[in-house]
Amino acid sequence: MNLPFDNEEYLSRQNRLFEELPPSTCLIIPTNDKKIRSNDVAYPFRPNSYMLYLCGWNGDEGVFLASNISGKFQSTLFVPPRDTKSEIWEGRRLGPEGARDWPVDNTQSIEDLEPTINQILNDAENIFHIQGISSKLDSALTDSREILDPRIIIDRMRVTKSKGEIKHIKEASRIGTEAHILAMKNAFPGIGEWEIQSIVEGHFMNCKSTWSFPSIVGGGDNATILHYKENSSKINNGDLVLVDAGCEVNGYASDITRTWPVNGKFTQPQREIYNVVLEAETAGIEACQAGAAWNSFHIAASKVLAKGLVDLGVFDCSPEEALGDQLDPDGPIRNFFMHGTGHLLGLDVHDVGGGRKGDKKPGPTLKSGMVLTVEPGLYFGSWRNDIHVPERYSGIGIRIEDDILITDNGPIVLTDMVPKTIEDIEEVVGIGV
Ligand SMILES: [Mn+2]
């Protein structure tokens, strides 16, 4: 057995959660369902993050069940039973016997889950369960009373990372850093976006890691599509390429973006926009101070972008007018900067805890131990016909993204080894070809 954390860490998470749950509660956390890709082939399996967080079970079936009925805390992990016939095809199973080392009081066969749940539904007053993860469990629990959602509590716990969690995020940042540098070194005019993707993801795989989200590799205008996923165009001499890619270590993500000229030399207009985004990113990172409000780094970065675009003549107004007068900048700047400036990072690349545009919850006040991304960008899609796109910058899309650890002594950039200044980038691009 080789879990990413020692049992004490898992047990303390379970304890902290139950300290906030009412007495006579039964908590049921399933892992993700297997998903069919086509016919009888499944998509690569990714365990559910809440399951990983609470007990580390990473198998493709399993349910974590814990209760505090009559003041007695008890936890059980239900796992697939040993079954030679199935193991011949799908791989060896631990079975309940082999899973005994996991941070739970008991292990049982998943086949015993239903009778156990029925019993516990009788005994417990409150049922906490995350719906929408396992369709089987959702339907098994439909006829019971009101289902309560434990995520409000667990998400708050997940926002601040432990030393062990930070170690895994640092490792994901390190591998991601290497992958981005490899891509820069081996690029040349005419390279396919998919070839850059293969360099990046090949390195992830080489490091026994995997992507934390499908990699975005967009050359020229494709960089102006925020979640571009085709990665199927060749990148022309003179174009920039935006690479937004990160990997996962023990479930913990990195998320890095760099934008660079595929021929190793920025043009003057590219330079102008790049330096505005870089200055905005620097200001955003500087604003990541413990105690600051969640949107401080968004406002700091947006202010620099607005001023930069006014100075470049993109806006014929004051920076304040370009920014808009809301706390969450929503002025004309949003024509060219449409997304938030960052998000929490952890077991999910867009981690739980709030703060994303459209989230019901505002983001948390910044605190030591939080990890987040800072990623301002400017996008001048030549295909936009809803707004006026200045000719000089048409076809330029630039985003710069780093992973930031908040500490009481200021922000630490976990991905600061990826070249970022124009000088450093021009020195690296193409030197491996
Ligand atoms: Mn991101």
Image (tube, grey):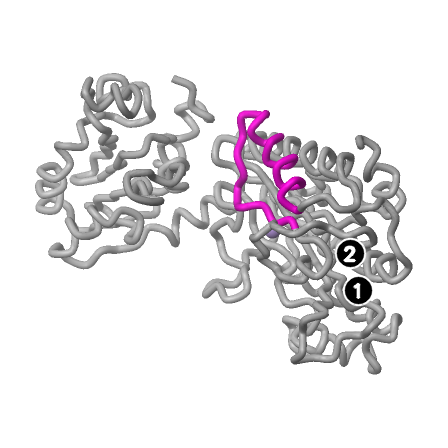
Is 174 displayed left or right of 77 in the figure?
right
Closer to the chain start, of discs 1 and 2, is 2
Three-letter amino acid code of the residue under disc 2? Ala
Residue 264 placement (x, y as % from top left): 85, 44
Mark 1 packing: few (<14 Cα in 10 Å), some, or many (20+)? many
Q: Tell me the number on the disc at residue 420.
A: none
198 part of magenta stretch? yes
Residue beneath disc 1: 304
Residue 154 in view here: yes
Q: Residue at x 87, y 62 (%)?
A: 269
- Does residue 76 lie above or below 119 as drawn? above
Image coordinates of residue 84 in percent, x first then y, are: 20, 17
Specify the label residue 283 is tagged with: 2
Q: Quadrant of the N terminus?
A: top left
Q: Quadrant of the C terminus?
A: top right
Tags 1 and 2 in contact by the CB under 8 Å rule?
yes
Residues packed near mark 2 inside 10 Å, few (<14), some (14 to 19) or many (20 plus): many
Query: Tag 2, which secondary structure?
Result: helix
- Name the residue: 72% across, 33% down: 182
Q: How many discs mark residues in the rendered view?
A: 2
Residue 358, relative to residue 345: is it above or below? Answer: below
- The amino acid beneath tag 1 is Val
Helix, strand or loop at label 1? It is helix
Per the rendered image, the range of residues in magenta is: 193-217
| Displayed quadrant of residue 184 | top right
The residue positioned 19% from the left and 45% from the top of the image is 24
Q: Is residue 165 magenta?
A: no
Residue 392 is left or right of residue 233, and the answer is right
Of 196 and 60, the residue lying toward us: 196
Q: CA distance from mark 1 to mark 2?
A: 7 Å
Residue occupying image coordinates x 26% and y 55%: 148
Does 87 sit above or below residue 21? above
